[in-house]
Image (tube, rainbow, N blue to C red):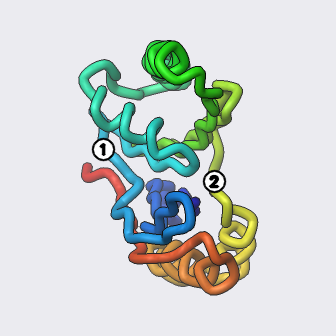
Amino acid sequence: MTVILAAKDKNGKPYIGGDSCGFTNYFKYEYGTKISKIKNFLIGGSGSYRTQQLIEYNKDRFKNINNEKDVFDFLQVLKDILRKDWTEREMKTDEDIDNNINFLIITKKDIYELDSDYSFHKVKIAATGIGSEYCLGAFTAIDKKKDIVKRIKEAIEITKKWHPFVGGKVYIETLKK
């Protein structure tokens, strides 16, 4: 359970932030950052920790993202990784596999929202995760004159107060020039 928020500063530079709360069964714990650097982009995810780990440990299978075609290609590679993992797990356990992919990608100039049906959208602002509605509402209500990092942090902090499954340290990142 989590919230990830991506937005651009007044100069159009994207930033991505998220909480660090994790849940397993009935336990809440500090998961750490849910944002990973892969090639020339950052990706933040909510939902399946397994999917996040498969992305993290298969970084070499992805290529740079410079345009929408590259996002499509990223999703095709991700789908192949997930299909292989799911097939192996289903054969061993007869487990019903959840295709829960909720991710935000930022490049040096763009934000992409990835949906569980493997579609994507180029957006100016987006949030994903269980606290996404709270976070987007808080972010849009915060004074737009404030620094983008402070706005993202404040929006996530507000979300932590209102949603029991959002918590822990807040991580905010952007890509260096």
- Give the amino acid type for the residue marked by disc 2 in the picture: Thr
The residue lying toward the viewer, choosing from 147 and 135, is 135
Left or right of 20? Residue 57 is: left
Which residue is located at x 47 percent, y 68 percent? 21
Can residue 76 be seen here? The reply is no
Which residue is located at x 59 percent, y 27 percent? 95
Q: In the rendered image of this protein, does residue 125 appear above or below residue 153?
A: above
Q: Toward which corner of the image does residue 163 lie, by quadrant? A: bottom right
Q: In the rendered image of this protein, does residue 175 appear above or below residue 53?
A: below
Q: Toward which corner of the image does residue 31 lie, by quadrant? A: bottom left
Q: Residues within 10 Å of mark 1 (few under 14, many from 20)?
A: some
Q: In the rendered image of this protein, does residue 126 appear above or below residue 54?
A: below
Name the residue tied to disc 1: 37
The mark nearer the N terminus, 1 or 2, is 1
The location of residue 94, given as percent across then percent down, is 59, 21
Q: Residues within 10 Å of mark 2 (few under 14, many from 20)?
A: many
Of the numbered discs in the image, which one, if any, rests on residue 128? 2
Number of labelled discs?
2
The residue lying toward the viewer, choosing from 128 and 90, is 90
The location of residue 22, given as percent across then percent down, is 47, 63
The location of residue 104, given as percent across then percent down, is 54, 45
Which residue is located at x 52 percent, y 72 percent? 152
The residue lying toward the viewer, choosing from 61 and 124, is 61
Which residue is located at x 24 percent, y 23 percent? 60
Q: Secondary structure at mark 2?
A: strand
The residue lying toward the viewer, choosing from 128 and 57, is 57
